[in-house]
Amino acid sequence: MTLPFRVLRLLAVLLLAVLCTYAGGLAVAAQRSEIETLTAVAALPAHIAGSFQQLSSCQQTAGGDYFIFDRRSHAVFVAPAGFESARKLITIGAEPGRLLDPSAFDLASDDSFVVADAPGGQPRIQVFLNTGSTVSVFRIPGRALPRITFGNLVLGGLAAVEYTGRSVFLSQPELGALIAEYSLDGRPLRTFGDLRKTGHEQDPGVHLAMNSGLVIANPAGGFFFVFLAGVPQFRKYDSTGRLLFDRHVEGPELDELVQALPTTWARRKGEDGNIPIVMPSVQAAAADAAGNLWIATAAGITYVYDSNGEKKRAVRFRGAGALSPTAMSFTPKGRLLVTPGCYAFETGRSRPGAVTPAL
């Protein structure tokens, strides 16, 4: 029996639609299957890791020592390369040279480091030598208002700090720019980076939270700024503060997170009024020696962008179990250190079928 031409044409159209849908599904599946799993090659021994209350940052010096920032203990520790022990270098206290309500830490290539804290709710930056001696202490005008909420931890305005050994860079959108640079004695040097439009300009708390982020000094020159909340996004600036490009962080793994972004926020009562509770869409970021930017998202996937802003890799981390980074830094030899846990990862691509030894 010969089918009418109209029926044949309809069947052909239906078959083509099915094939296109199937091909699209294969493309998405292939895109998702390209996620690499990096397995830790080293970590803090259990007897040392268990001594910290909240290991918030782990960074290594050129000499091999590890500096460990424990936010909940209000302390900085130093451990030798072999992790035989960990010695408390900076202790709790409101006076200069000690820490109270610390929020951020960074280590420079000369082994000096900075800690941002807020005794009495007043933001403060302290610069230390690797011996623990204080180099300088200065206050940041205003109060440390909470902006971003990580789980049950509420972070104030100085949620992150970038320290080059010569300058301190902060995210301070309340100044009308994304990035503020200070000298080591606290003198404001410059601000740069236009705030992004959020649609919430009439709500300063939300607008500032959506313009808070991570300042990353690019080892290849210039800076990255990675927005912490709202639609995942980053910008690249040259050393003069000129914008080079602006990119959205995209991938099928982020679709659910982006679609679920809120349009209204619960509020927390504080001394300065009702403050919106804003959750992060990005948890950590770091730049490697080649100028590639690693961005750890709240979806548990880390994306790697090259110096031109093109996405090159999607990565999952595995330590003792699945690991979602809350801080990242690169060692002088190019390993990636990830907290929680101070796990170390080789960042080169694994050979197909290769197995990285478990801890």
Image (cartoon, grey):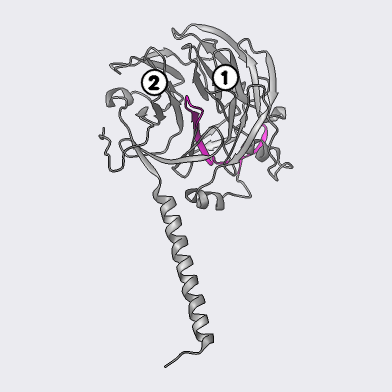
- Residue 75 place in picture, x, y as percent: 44, 18
Q: CA distance from mark 1 to mark 2?
A: 36 Å
Q: Which residue is mark 1?
A: 119
Q: Is residue 96 above or below residue 357?
A: above
Answer whether labels 1 and 2 touch (C-beta < 8 Å): no
Is residue 290 shown in magenta? yes
Q: Earlier in the sequence, mark 1 or mark 2?
A: 1
Indicate the position of residue 72 as horizontal and vertical percent values: 45, 25
Q: Which residues are magenta?
A: 267-292
Q: Which residue is mark 2?
A: 333
**Residue beneath the point at 51% across and 41% down:** 311
Q: Nearer the viewer, residue 61 or 54?
A: 61
Q: Amino acid at mark 1?
A: Pro
SS under mark 2: loop
Figure label count: 2
In the image, 131: left or right of 235?
A: left
Q: Examine the rendering and report whether any part of residue 102 can be seen.
A: no
